[in-house]
Image (cartoon, rainbow, N blue to C red):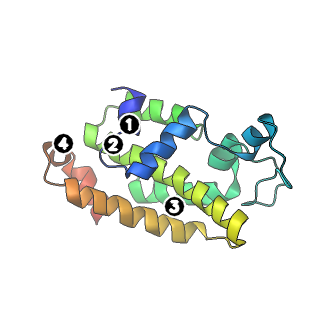
Amino acid sequence: MEVSDLIWNSVALPRYRFHMWLVVYGRLLAKERLLRLHIPLENPNCCLCDHRVMETSTHLFVDCNWITTLRVELIQWTNVQLPVGELKHVLECIKRKHWKTFKKDVIAAVWGAMTYQTWRVQNYRVFKGAILQPTEVATQIKREIVQRIEVLRSSKKAHRSREFLHRILS
């Protein structure tokens, strides 16, 4: 299994897949990258936390307090511990796990949803001036992942991971 298989899996929503691809291959236009492209910004700092740190992909998806809170809630829900790090590193760790393929797909989809939703909340804050709480976003991610699992539940891959799915769906 390749990292690309985890990015383009059937559990992840298409917007999560595309966003994961952008993050893994360094194409996401975080403020740091905008500055490298000589695009002027009023404020290059992360708008989700109070640390006054430049918004980089690493900060936004690994170090920011906002995503840390979201990540803790999703780890409790899935009961899966993974190392904290860049998305590509996390996907490589998932790939090496001795899990059923469907479980790998679900966990990769959860991480993809987490990065996508963090990016969405960051844009919501920048363009609308409001911030969503990590608990609200976690609830939305859980609902979307459960809906995808329900659609794919009758597949052979899902059937082989029924113990894991029972825990996620209950």
Residue occupying the point 75% across, 48% down: 55
Q: Quadrant of residue 135?
A: bottom right
Q: Earlier in the sequence, mark 2 or mark 4?
A: 2
Q: Earlier in the sequence, mark 2 or mark 3?
A: 3
Residue behind mark 2? 105
14 vs 27: above or below: below
Name the mark nearer the viewer: 2 or 3: 2
Question: Is the N terminus in the top left, top right, bottom left or bottom right quadrant?
Answer: top left
Q: Secondary structure at mark 1?
A: helix
User: Marks 4 and 1, Cα distance to the nearest angstrom?
Assistant: 14 Å
User: Marks 1 and 2, Cα distance to the nearest angstrom?
Assistant: 6 Å
Task: Identify residue type, mark 3.
Answer: Glu
Name the mark nearer the viewer: 3 or 1: 1
Residue placed most toward the observer, 123 or 81: 123
User: Marks 3 and 1, Cα distance to the nearest angstrom?
Assistant: 22 Å
106 vs 4: above or below: below
Q: Earlier in the sequence, mark 3 or mark 1?
A: 1
Mark 2 and mark 1 in contact (Cβ < 8 Å)?
yes
Task: Identify residue type, mark 2.
Answer: Asp
Residue 101 is marked as none
Residue 73 is marked as 3
Mark 4 and mark 2 in contact (Cβ < 8 Å)?
yes
Task: Identify residue type, mark 1.
Answer: Leu
Residue behind mark 1? 6
User: Marks 2 and 3, Cα distance to the nearest angstrom?
Assistant: 19 Å
Q: Is residue 30 found left or right of 104 in the rendered image?
A: right
